[in-house]
Image (cartoon, helix red, strand yellow):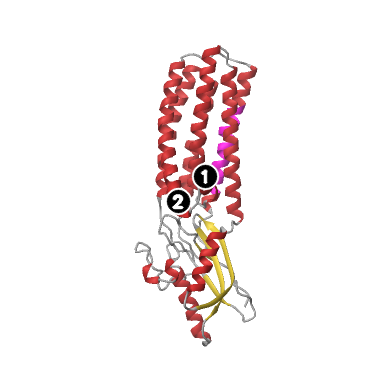
């Protein structure tokens, strides 16, 4: 039988359990904090999701960036440093981006309804895309433009001590925010058996990726800004300072383009990674009701949320009503797994090859 239109499920959430698909074969051992679907709720509809550590990470980043943006703006006015102005613009862009990320996190967690049976998970990528475009247009564009203007019409800077003090303060606050993002990334990467950078790049959580990338870029920008201000002070020439502003802009442009590309991929439909697909297939085959699996489709519909459809050959030879109930039981068993938001199972024809 040809598979029906898919239904949603979730990728193995590395923050839940060592084996996030254990409930496929041991339904009673599903995570206590994840209530089973209500009898009247179809398991083919995405179940409600809950806030997590990514929200805390974004809030910390927002507070740090807002405070640093004010401090850098004041220092840029006092010193007249091009690099400091670029850093101020960078921090204001990051602050605005955190607002987009908070909106993304909140709106993507809305429960599915009749008109949106797959939920609103992909809204996370829409708002994260806005944040990435804003970082490119505001952060990179203004920094590069101002740096070029300083090269054409150089102006000397002063009060370098203020610039160094603000850069030091920014290093502490941005470093604290980065530590929070990297701690979350390390914990998830360890359980997913990825290295940290690889996990940040491939994770379906756009808020974690954005905060990690923006904070890393901020730390690089601080080093560049410090070098530009120091060279300006030592040489008396504003050229190194202007070049520093351009370099900061280029760094922001690269980061924003990477973020745009990752969000684009998830918006158009990112397939599950091979190890995730293999884990789901292995657990489906191990279920006592399933003889074999002939079709399996997994596609992201939100952060840690996969759209799953499987065509299975059921064990035994049952009447139609019994088969329908067994399929429904399979779907409800699957959605008891914390990492599964919804599922659809269909019956395979005898001639379909096994996976």
Q: Examine the image and state in which quarter residue 309 appears.
A: bottom right
Q: Secondary structure at mark 2?
A: helix
Bin the neighbour count of mark 1 within 10 Å (Cα to Cα): few under 14, some 14-19, many 20 and up. some
160 lies above or below 107: above
Say which residue label 2 marks.
Answer: 190
* Residue 289, image x, y percentages: 48, 78
Name the magenta segment's main secondary structure.
helix
Looking at this rendering, what residue extends furthest in the left direction?
Answer: 32
* Residue 210, image x, y percentages: 51, 43
Cα separation, mark 2 vs mark 1, equals 11 Å
Q: Residue at x 51, y 68 (%)?
A: 282
Say which residue label 1 marks.
Answer: 197
Location of the C terminus by quadrant is bottom right
Location of the N terminus by quadrant is bottom right
> 210 and 291: which one is in front?
291
Residue 196 among magenta residues: no
Q: Secondary structure at mark 1?
A: helix
111 lies above or below 322: above
Q: Examine the image and state in which quarter residue 60 appears.
A: top left
Please report the bounds of the magenta region as a residue range. 126-144
Q: Residue at x 54, y 23 (%)?
A: 83
Can see residue 291? Answer: yes
> 100 and 60: which one is in front?
60
* Residue 129, image x, y percentages: 56, 45
Q: If you read the primary sequence from the N terminus, does the residue marked by circle 2 or circle 1 appear first? A: 2
Residue 142 among magenta residues: yes
Q: Residue at x 44, y 42 (%)?
A: 182
Q: Residue at x 60, y 32 (%)?
A: 250
């Amino acid at each position: 039988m040809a598979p029906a239109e898919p239904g949603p499920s979730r990728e193995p959430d590395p923050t839940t359990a060592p084996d996030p698909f254990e409930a496929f074969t041991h339904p009673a051992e599903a995570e206590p904090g994840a209530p089973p679907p209500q009898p009247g709720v179809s398991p083919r509809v995405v179940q409600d999701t809950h806030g997590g550590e990514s929200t805390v990470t974004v809030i910390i980043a927002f507070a740090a960036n807002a405070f640093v943006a004010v401090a850098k703006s004041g220092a840029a006015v006092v010193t007249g440093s091009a690099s400091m102005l670029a850093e101020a613009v960078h921090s204001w862009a990051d602050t605005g981006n955190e607002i987009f990320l908070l909106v993304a996190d909140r709106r993507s967690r809305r429960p599915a309804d009749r008109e949106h049976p797959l939920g609103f998970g992909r809204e996370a990528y829409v708002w994260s895309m806005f944040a990435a475009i804003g970082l490119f247009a505001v952060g990179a564009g203004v920094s590069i433009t101002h740096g070029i203007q300083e090269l054409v019409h150089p102006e000397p800077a002063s009060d370098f001590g203020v610039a160094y003090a603000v850069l030091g303060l920014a290093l502490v606050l941005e470093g604290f925010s980065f530590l929070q993002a990297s701690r979350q990334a390390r914990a998830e990467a360890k359980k997913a058996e990825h290295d940290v950078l690889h996990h940040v790049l491939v994770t379906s959580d756009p808020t974690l990726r954005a905060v990690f990338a923006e904070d890393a870029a901020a730390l690089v920008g601080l080093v560049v800004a410090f070098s530009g201000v120091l060279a300006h002070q030592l040489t008396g020439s504003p050229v190194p300072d202007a070049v520093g502003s351009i370099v900061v802009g280029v760094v922001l442009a690269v980061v924003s383009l990477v973020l745009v590309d990752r969000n684009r991929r998830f918006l158009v439909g990112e397939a599950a990674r091979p190890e995730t697909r293999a884990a789901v297939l292995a657990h489906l085959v191990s279920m006592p009701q399933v003889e074999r699996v002939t079709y399996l489709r997994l596609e992201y519909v939100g952060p840690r949320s996969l759209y799953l459809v499987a065509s299975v050959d059921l064990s035994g030879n049952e009447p139609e009503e019994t088969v329908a109930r067994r399929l429904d039981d399979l779907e409800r068993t699957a959605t008891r797994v914390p990492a599964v938001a919804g599922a659809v199972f269909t019956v395979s024809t005898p001639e379909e090859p096994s996976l």
